[in-house]
Image (cartoon, coloured by chain):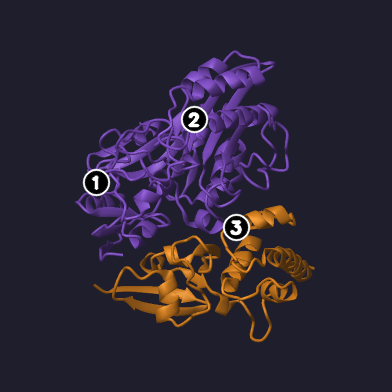
């Protein structure tokens, strides 16, 4: 059985012929499109390492069939920087030591970008932590991650304000 | 995952026809089904992908004030819909207390209703489980069962229903709209989930091909908006299923409870409505005495299915806490830690209740 889907990945249109409907978005990205920045942790929706944005919303790519996403726009960690300029969330993770081993970091950063876009947490650290609970960090960099999200949110809000002015 | 045929119907009628054959399963977001398929617990031979079906992703207010929620509305979208959350705050709180932000962004209303139990013996294909393999036996009975059911269970199955969303829904008389081979019908949510009896493999009243297309909350549920809470005790405060949970809602007239709604989660094979406790509360003065009596009535008939006697007392205390917080008034905004009894707002904390 061959399923043809077409989706936009990091701004680029990709036409994919799936030879098996079991392919998840995560496996499509890593094994077929060779975008290995998105990590496979538990592969069961528990750790958040595979978080990407689909049509602007953060989801677990391990629990999504690629075949379901015909026509969708996917943003992965490879697509967030502008050339050599890091995304404000990436820069904030470095500034605040928001990681140690780095394995969960692409998922943490994509989740943080999704969280900021959702606009529900404000600058309450408790709400940030709650909204990031779908991303596990076995190194325990949570304190730095919370600080990084708070700072990145401020940076992005200031940029928005600057643009509006 | 075992191999399957993948079909993506474009109409509800096509979907029902495609799913009516043995071995077929509906796929919406897949947050539960794909997990079950990866673990070999569910092995559908045909996956009917309904995620692109048109018209099922709307939240509509009907002429009589009822709200009709399409089956493909995402959990996060419903919880953050301003008008919905204002009218049904405990439903929004329950949604936000479940899973993670990523899962809530994907998971659908219909899928939430039909998610399977998280009993670890159901999930472990090396264990005996009557729900997974009818007649195989139940390893949970002699196993690690402190989190299992204390109400509604049978010798064949002691698993609990895991949904948070369904708990306030059942308290508010939600109705499920179903499209099946013989057309459209509707049933009360309370009748959707089955007790296990001797056939725990059947979770619900749905027949092959039946597709949930919407859930409706009647207008009467709006009158509880000022005093409605969902509380959920978990082994960690976020991203965990309930040990016990309670949805409590009151209509208060001066110093008297005009009517009450009360349902429990995490204690039974289905979301557990407690009508006797509700009747007990009607006409009572809102306070510790009435709340404790209601809690006792809510858990009347509860019996341990294993090492879980503690859940009976725990659920009673949670009911008292939920009623106390509901009486105090719905907060203007869902707490930073939704449904947590340990949230920064400690009003209603009765540590010696």
Residue B138 in the image: state x and y as whole percent.
31, 43
Q: Nearer the viewer, residue B201 or A6?
A: B201
Q: Nearer the viewer, residue A4 or A163?
A: A4
Q: Label 2: how many residues lie within 10 Å, few (<14), some (14-19) or many (20+)?
A: many
Q: Which circle, 2 or 1, is nearer the viewer?
A: 1
A145 relative to B261 in the view: left or right: right
Q: Which residue is mark 1?
A: B136
Image quarter in which the C terminus of chain B is found: top right
Residue B334 in the image: state x and y as whole percent.
65, 43
Q: Which circle, 2 or 3, is nearer the viewer?
A: 3
Q: Label 1: how many residues lie within 10 Å, few (<14), some (14-19) or many (20+)?
A: few
Q: Which chain is purple?
A: B
- Residue at the (43%, 23%) spot, across then down: B301
Q: Classify B134 as above or below B350.
A: below
Find residue A151 and report its image quarter: bottom right
User: What whole-number distance in Å separates the C-alpha atoms at marks 2 and 3?
Assistant: 28 Å
Query: Which circle's residue, 2 or 1, is located before the other in the chain?
Result: 1
Secondary structure of residue under mark 3: loop
Q: Which residue is mark 3?
A: A133
Residue at the far bottom: name it. Answer: A84
Q: Nearer the viewer, residue B351 or B294?
A: B351
Q: Is residue B172 visible?
A: no
User: What whole-number distance in Å separates the C-alpha atoms at marks 2 and 1?
Assistant: 34 Å
Q: Kindly indicate whether the residue at mark 3 contacts the one at mark 1 (C-beta within 8 angstroms).
A: no
Secondary structure of residue under mark 2: helix
Q: Which chain is orange?
A: A
Q: Is residue A19 visible?
A: yes
**Chain of the residue where label 3 is placed in the rendered structure:** A
Q: Which residue is mark 2?
A: B171
Please count the marks in the image.
3
Residue B27 in the image: state x and y as whole percent.
35, 56
A154 relative to B37 in the view: left or right: right
């Amino acid at each position: 059985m061959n399923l043809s889907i077409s989706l936009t990945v990091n701004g680029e249109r990709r036409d994919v012929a799936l030879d098996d409907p079991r392919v998840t978005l995560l496996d499509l990205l890593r094994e077929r499109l060779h975008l290995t920045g998105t990590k496979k942790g538990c592969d069961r929706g528990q750790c958040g390492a595979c978080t990407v944005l689909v049509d602007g919303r953060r989801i677990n790519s391990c629990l999504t069939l690629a075949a379901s996403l015909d026509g969708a726009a996917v943003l992965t960690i490879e697509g967030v920087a502008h050339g050599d300029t890091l995304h404000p969330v990436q820069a904030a993770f470095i500034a605040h030591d928001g990681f140690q081993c780095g394995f969960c970091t692409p998922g943490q950063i994509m989740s943080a970008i999704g969280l900021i876009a959702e606009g529900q947490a404000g600058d309450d650290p408790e709400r940030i932590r709650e909204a990031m609970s779908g991303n596990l960090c076995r190194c325990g960099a949570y304190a730095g991650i919370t600080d990084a999200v708070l700072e990145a949110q401020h940076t992005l809000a200031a940029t928005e304000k600057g643009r509006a002015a | 995952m075992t191999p399957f045929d993948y079909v993506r119907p474009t109409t509800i009628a096509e979907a029902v026809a495609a799913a009516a054959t043995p071995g077929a399963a509906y796929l919406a977001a897949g947050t539960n089904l794909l997990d079950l398929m990866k673990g070999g617990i569910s092995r559908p031979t045909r996956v009917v992908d309904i995620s692109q079906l048109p018209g099922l992703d709307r939240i509509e207010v009907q002429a009589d004030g009822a709200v009709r929620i399409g089956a493909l509305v995402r959990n996060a979208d419903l919880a953050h819909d301003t008008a919905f959350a204002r009218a049904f705050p405990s439903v929004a709180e329950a949604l936000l207390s479940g899973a993670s932000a990523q899962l809530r962004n994907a998971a659908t209303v219909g899928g939430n209703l039909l998610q399977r139990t998280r009993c670890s013996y159901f999930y472990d294909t090396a264990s005996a489980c009557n729900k997974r393999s009818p007649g195989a036996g139940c390893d949970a009975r002699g196993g690690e069962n402190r989190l299992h059911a204390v109400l509604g269970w049978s010798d064949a199955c002691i698993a609990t229903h895991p949904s948070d969303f369904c708990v306030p829904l059942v308290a508010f008389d939600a109705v499920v709209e179903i499209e099946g081979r013989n057309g459209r019908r509707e049933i009360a949510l309370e009748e959707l989930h089955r007790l296990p009896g001797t056939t725990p493999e059947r979770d619900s009243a749905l027949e092959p091909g039946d597709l949930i297309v919407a859930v409706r909350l009647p207008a009467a549920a709006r009158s509880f908006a000022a005093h409605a809470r969902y509380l959920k005790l978990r082994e960690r405060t976020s991203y965990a299923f309930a040990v016990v949970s309670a949805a409590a809602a009151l209509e208060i007239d001066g110093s008297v409870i005009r009517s009450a709604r009360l349902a429990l989660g995490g204690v039974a094979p289905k979301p557990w409505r407690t009508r006797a406790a509700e009747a007990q509360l009607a006409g009572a003065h809102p306070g510790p005495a009435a709340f404790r009596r209601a809690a006792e009535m809510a858990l009347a008939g509860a019996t341990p299915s294993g090492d879980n006697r503690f859940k009976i007392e725990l659920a009673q205390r949670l009911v008292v806490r939920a009623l106390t917080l509901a009486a105090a008034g719905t907060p203007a905004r869902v707490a930073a830690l939704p449904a947590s009894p340990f949230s920064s707002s400690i009003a209603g904390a009765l540590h010696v209740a």
